[in-house]
Amino acid sequence: MAVQREGTLLLFDCGEGTQRQMVLAKPSISNPSHVFITHLHGDHLLGILGLIQSMALQNRTEPLHLYGPKGLDEIVEFNMAALKVHIPYEICFHRVRQGVVLQERGFKVMAHNTKHTADSYAYRLDESPRPGRFDPKKAEALGIPKGPLWGKLQKGRSVEIAGRKVRPSEVVGRRRRGRSFGYSGDARPTADLARFFRGVDLLVFDGTYSEEYADKAAEYMHSTVGEAASLAAKARVGKLVLTHVSARINDESLLLSQAQKRFHRVEIGEDFSRYDLPLPE
Ligand SMILES: [Zn+2]
Ligand SMILES: [Zn+2]
């Protein structure tokens, strides 16, 4: 999963062939600054060395931040040493625990434990709320001339005009919420996880099995599409995208109909699917 947000590209998991897929997907920013690994199973991790190496060939200089459970640094460092991979940039490892794992200007990323056969984390990205909409008519009615004073009010500062103080709340609407995104990795659909994903605009969730394989989903600690859909309904997400679909399933319309019984705004994720999240008003 690649999330492109303004000038930043974030990756969530890095399966085999990620670097090749990135070339084909042509994101407008080609290199991720942060990579969040859910757990140390090969299908979520095997692409990391290829990515590291190809970014070295492009002479990357800015550091790469890698997030994941305990042991991620050992795997990457061991392989780099064994393969004699030398890179012109720094890799910063961040061991993930529950809570906020990245706080940037404009957004943050949080992690939450998932129930799976390995130490595993789900991630959630939330943008900070944006300032409310500035109302030029109100500003004019209050006698504030267009120019630097408008800018001050938009930034949340009071201004003085003809001896009267004008507060931002008089001309700027309520703060608007930012966008949010959730990614489960491999996971059982727990109530805890539904709470963690509460209200995200887009949720990408483990949909490994069809309903006929509910026992396998429980045994291998994944989710059926119906379980994923129920969680999405409980969490009141905007849209659900099912992913990690088992290779043994060749009838995707069946999966979709099973999921839609419990949550309507659902799709099966495909390679190179793109989802635009508009800014909420
Ligand atoms: Zn796994
Ligand atoms: Zn997996």
Image (cartoon, grey):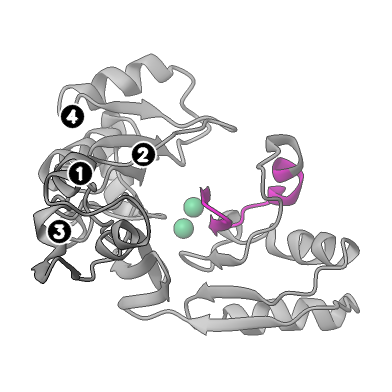
Q: In the displayed structure, would residue 147 be above or below residue 205? A: below
Q: Which residue is mark 4?
A: 263
Q: Which residue is mark 3?
A: 195
Residue 181: give x, y in percent of width and height.
35, 50
**Amino acid identity at mark 2:** Gly
For the residues bearing labels 4 and 2, Cβ distance under 8 angstroms: no
- Image point (18%, 55%), residue name: 175
Magenta-highlighted residues: 3-22
Side of 230 relative to 117 (left or right): left
Looking at marks 2 and 1 on the same chain, the residue that comes earlier in the sequence is marked by 1
Q: CA distance from mark 4 to mark 3?
A: 16 Å
Furthest residue to the front?
162
Q: CA distance from mark 2 to mark 3?
A: 18 Å
Say if the magenta span includes residue 18: yes
Question: Of residues 194 and 65, which is closer to you in this image?
Answer: 65
Q: Quadrant of residue 105?
A: bottom left
Whether residue 106 is visible to the viewer of this picture, yes or no, is: yes
Which mark is in front, 3 or 1?
1
